[in-house]
C-alpha cells in the first residue's frame, strides 16, 4: 500500500511539474476584469516580526534580516509549503506601510523570477490556489508604484497559475486542499482577462465537492473543527466573489454553507475559540465570528451531535465532548485517539483542554499529541483508545492512520434535575482488555458546577474472560488507569485540602476546585500545551486520577465547582501580557 501511494505521489509530482511548465507558454492575462475585495486578514504583530527578519513558519524560526526568502534553506517540507502558499502576505498587508510593501514586492517578484516558469517547489494545486487568492486579494497593495514591466510579469504569472489550476485541480487531495484549489480557480476566472472560461467549470466542480465532502451534519470526514472553519471561510469567499460578478453559486455550494454554520457555532467555546480536536487548533482570533457574520446564516444546530461532538452550555461555561468514533482511512492521517475527551471554557478563559496537535514541533510531538494521554480522557493500562498504524507517505510527509479505533460510541444528551446530562461510551478497550469505557457529565444550569463519572465495565461473558486473562497476566494486581484533566497554561493550580482537591485560579479572578471520590490517587503533574505560532510547547499542568481496575465494574467520580466567581460589574477583557516563549 505504501509503495502504491509512493508511486502515485511521484506521478502526481511529475504531472504537476509538467503542467506548470506547459502553462508558462500560455497567453498571459493583461489585467483585471474585476478585483474582489480583500477578505484575508493577517496579524499586525506577525507582520512586524517578518519585517524585522524573524521568519517563523511551520514552527521553525530563521533570523534573516533583509534576506530574500527564496534563497534560504528550508528546515522541512512544511516550512516550504507555508512560504509558497503566501499566507505571510496577509500579515504584511496588515502592517500596510512602505516597508511592508517593499518586502512584499521583493519577495513576490523574487518568486516569479525563481519559480514562475514552473520550476522548484510550490506547484501543487492547493498551494497554487492559496497563492492566487492572496495575490488577487492584495493586488492593489502589491502593484502600487510598480512599473509596467513588473505589472506585466505579475499578470503573466497569475494567468500561468490559473491555467495550471484549470488542468490540475483534480489532482489535489479531497477536502481542504481541493477547496483551496477550486476557490483559487474561481477567483482567477472572475478576476483576470482571458481566464473567464475557468469560472463556470470551477463553480460546478465546487458544488460537487460540497455535496461529497460536507455531510448532512455540516461536518467533514476528518472531524477537524479548524479545517471545517477553513473550508467554510473559502466557501463564503467564493460565494461573495461570484455574487459580486453577478453569477449564481451552485445550489450545493450555498447549501453547504447553510449546513456548516450551525455546526461551527456548536464547536465554538464561550471565548469564541474552536474546540481543539483531531489536529485542529482554536483558529485565528476573530476569524470564526467574521466568517459566520459574512455567511448571513443565523441558524443554530438542533439538539444532538455536531460533526460527532456534543456541546453542553450553561451560564458562562461551555463544554465540548468528542462523542463519535474517530475518522477512518485516509481521513485519519491527522486524527487523534480522543474519544470521550472533553474541553471546558469559563467565560473568556479555557480551563480544561487537550494538549493539541504537535505537528509544528516535529514527528515525535505529532505522535505524542495524537495519543489518548494527551487528552482530557481516561487511558487504560498505557493503551490509547485507538492505535497508530504503520506510517505511509502522504505527499512529502510520513503519516499514520488510526487503527483498532472505537466503532461503537453510543451517546445520549438529556436534561437532569438541575442541569444538562451527557452519557457516552466506547469500545476502544474491549478487544484488548474486555472493558467498555463510559463517561457521564452533568453541568448545572448556572454553569458553576460539573459532576463527572468514568466507568470501566466488562459487559459480555467474552469481555469478562478477556478481563480475567489480563488480570492473570498482571498477577491479579489490577489494570492500571489514569483519568487526565489537562489545564490551560494560564491556569494557576495547586493541590489543596491536604491532597484531597486541586484549586485552579483563572486570570479573570474565578476560582475552580476539583475533587474526587473513591480510591484513586490524585496528583498534579506537568503537561504541555501544543499550539501553532510558537517555537516550542508551552508548559502547563494536568490533574491525574490514578487507580487500578480490580473488578468487572470500576467507578471513578469527580467534580469541578466554581468557588469564586468573576464580579458582575467587571468585564473579563483579553488584555494579557505579550506572549513569550520561555
Image: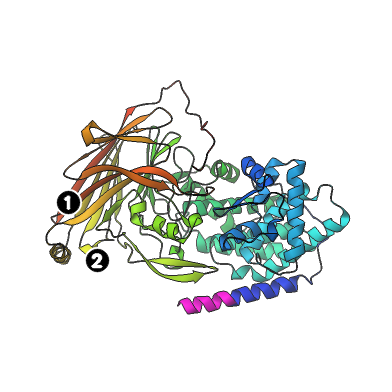
CA neighbours of label 2 inside 10 A, class few (<14), some (14 to 19), many (20+): some
* Direction from residue 482 to residue 97 in the image, left or right: right
The residue tagged with tag 1: helix, strand or loop?
A: strand
The CA distance from mark 1 to mark 2 is 18 Å
The answer to whether residue 26 is magenta is no
Can the viewer see residue 169?
yes
Q: Is residue 305 left or right of residue 56?
A: left
User: Is residue 527 shown left or right of residue 159?
Assistant: left
**Mark closer to the chain start, 1 or 2:** 2
The image shows residue 166 at horizontal and vertical percentages of 69, 68
Q: Which residues are magenta?
A: 1-10
| Dot 1 alpha-carbon crowd within 10 angstroms: few under 14, some 14 to 19, many 20 or more | some
Q: Is residue 4 above or below residue 319?
A: below
| Residue situated in front as seen by the camera: 247 or 99 | 99
| Secondary structure beneath label 2 | helix
Task: Check the image and report above or below for 278 versus 400.
Answer: above
Q: In the image, what residue occupies the spot 23% across and 58% down? A: 436
Most extreme residue toward the top is 569
Q: Nearer the viewer, residue 335 or 448?
A: 335
Picture quarter with the N terminus: bottom left
Image quadrant in which you'd find residue 561: top left
Residue named by callout 2: 431
Visible residue check, residue 246: no
> Which residue is drawn at the image coordinates 56% and 60% (left, top)?
78
Q: Residue at x 87, y 58 (%)?
A: 149
Where is residue 167 drawn, in percent x and y?
68, 71
Residue at (58% x, 57% y) in the render: 253
Please give the residue where the numbered disc 1 appears in the rendered image.
Answer: 554
- Please, what is the dominant secondary structure of the magenta stretch? helix
Residue 190 locus on image (x, y percent): 73, 57
Towards the viewer: 578 or 73: 73
What kind of colouring is applied to the model shown? rainbow
Amino acid at each position: 500500500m505504501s509503495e502504491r501511494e509512493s508511486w502515485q505521489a511521484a506521478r502526481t509530482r511529475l504531472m504537476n511539474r509538467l503542467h506548470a511548465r506547459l502553462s508558462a507558454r500560455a497567453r498571459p492575462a493583461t489585467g483585471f476584469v474585476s478585483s474582489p475585495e480583500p477578505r484575508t486578514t493577517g496579524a499586525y504583530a506577525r507582520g512586524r516580526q517578518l519585517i524585522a527578519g524573524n521568519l517563523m513558519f511551520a514552527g521553525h524560526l530563521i533570523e534573516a534580516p533583509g534576506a530574500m526568502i527564496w534563497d534560504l534553506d528550508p528546515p522541512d517540507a512544511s516550512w516550504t509549503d507555508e512560504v509558497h502558499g503566501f499566507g505571510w502576505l496577509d500579515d504584511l498587508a496588515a502592517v500596510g506601510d512602505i516597508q511592508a510593501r517593499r518586502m512584499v514586492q521583493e519577495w513576490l517578484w523574487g518568486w516569479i523570477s525563481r519559480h514562475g516558469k514552473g520550476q522548484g517547489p510550490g506547484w501543487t494545486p492547493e498551494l497554487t490556489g492559496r497563492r492566487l487568492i492572496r495575490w488577487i486579494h492584495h493586488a492593489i497593495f502589491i502593484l502600487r508604484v510598480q512599473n509596467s514591466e513588473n505589472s506585466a510579469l505579475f499578470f503573466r504569472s497569475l494567468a500561468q497559475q490559473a491555467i495550471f489550476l484549470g488542468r490540475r485541480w483534480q489532482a489535489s487531495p479531497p477536502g481542504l486542499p481541493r477547496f483551496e484549489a477550486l476557490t483559487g480557480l474561481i477567483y482567477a476566472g472572475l478576476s483576470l482577462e482571458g481566464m473567464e472560461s475557468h469560472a463556470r467549470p470551477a463553480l460546478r466542480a465546487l458544488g460537487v465537492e460540497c455535496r461529497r465532502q460536507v455531510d448532512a451534519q455540516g461536518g467533514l470526514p476528518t472531524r477537524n473543527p479548524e479545517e471545517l472553519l477553513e473550508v467554510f471561510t473559502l466557501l463564503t469567499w467564493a460565494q461573495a466573489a461570484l455574487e459580486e460578478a453577478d453569477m449564481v453559486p451552485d445550489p450545493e455550494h450555498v447549501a453547504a454553507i447553510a449546513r456548516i454554520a450551525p455546526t461551527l457555532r456548536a464547536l465554538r467555546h464561550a471565548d469564541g475559540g474552536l474546540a481543539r480536536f483531531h489536529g485542529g487548533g482554536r483558529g485565528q482570533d476573530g476569524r470564526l465570528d467574521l466568517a459566520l457574520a459574512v455567511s448571513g446564516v443565523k441558524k443554530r444546530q438542533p439538539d444532538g451531535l455536531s460533526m460527532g461532538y456534543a456541546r453542553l452550555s450553561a451560564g458562562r461555561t461551555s463544554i465540548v465532548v468528542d462523542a463519535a468514533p474517530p475518522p477512518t482511512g485516509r481521513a485519519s492521517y491527522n486524527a487523534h485517539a480522543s474519544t470521550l475527551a472533553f474541553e471546558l471554557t469559563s467565560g473568556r478563559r479555557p480551563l480544561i483542554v487537550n494538549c493539541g496537535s504537535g505537528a509544528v514541533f516535529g514527528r515525535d510531538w505529532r505522535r505524542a499529541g495524537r495519543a489518548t494521554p494527551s487528552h482530557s480522557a481516561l487511558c487504560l493500562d498505557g493503551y490509547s483508545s485507538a492505535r497508530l498504524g504503520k506510517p505511509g507517505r502522504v505527499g512529502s510527509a510520513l503519516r499514520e492512520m488510526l487503527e483498532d479505533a472505537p466503532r461503537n460510541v453510543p451517546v445520549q444528551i438529556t436534561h437532569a434535575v438541575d442541569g444538562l446530562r451527557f452519557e457516552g461510551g466506547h469500545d476502544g478497550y474491549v478487544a484488548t482488555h474486555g472493558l467498555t469505557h463510559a463517561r457521564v457529565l452533568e453541568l448545572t444550569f448556572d454553569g458553576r458546577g460539573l459532576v463527572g463519572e468514568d466507568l470501566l465495565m466488562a459487559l459480555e461473558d467474552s469481555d469478562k474472560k478477556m478481563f480475567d486473562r489480563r488480570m492473570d497476566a498482571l498477577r491479579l494486581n489490577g489494570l492500571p488507569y489514569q483519568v487526565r484533566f489537562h489545564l490551560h497554561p494560564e491556569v494557576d493550580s495547586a493541590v489543596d485540602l491536604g491532597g484531597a482537591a486541586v484549586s485552579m485560579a483563572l486570570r479573570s479572578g474565578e476560582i475552580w476546585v476539583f475533587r474526587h471520590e473513591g480510591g484513586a490517587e490524585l496528583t498534579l503533574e506537568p503537561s504541555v500545551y501544543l499550539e501553532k505560532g510558537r517555537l516550542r510547547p508551552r508548559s502547563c499542568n494536568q490533574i491525574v486520577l490514578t487507580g487500578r481496575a480490580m473488578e468487572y465494574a470500576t467507578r471513578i467520580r469527580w467534580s469541578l465547582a466554581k468557588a469564586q466567581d468573576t464580579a458582575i460589574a467587571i468585564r473579563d477583557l483579553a488584555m494579557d501580557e505579550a506572549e513569550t516563549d520561555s
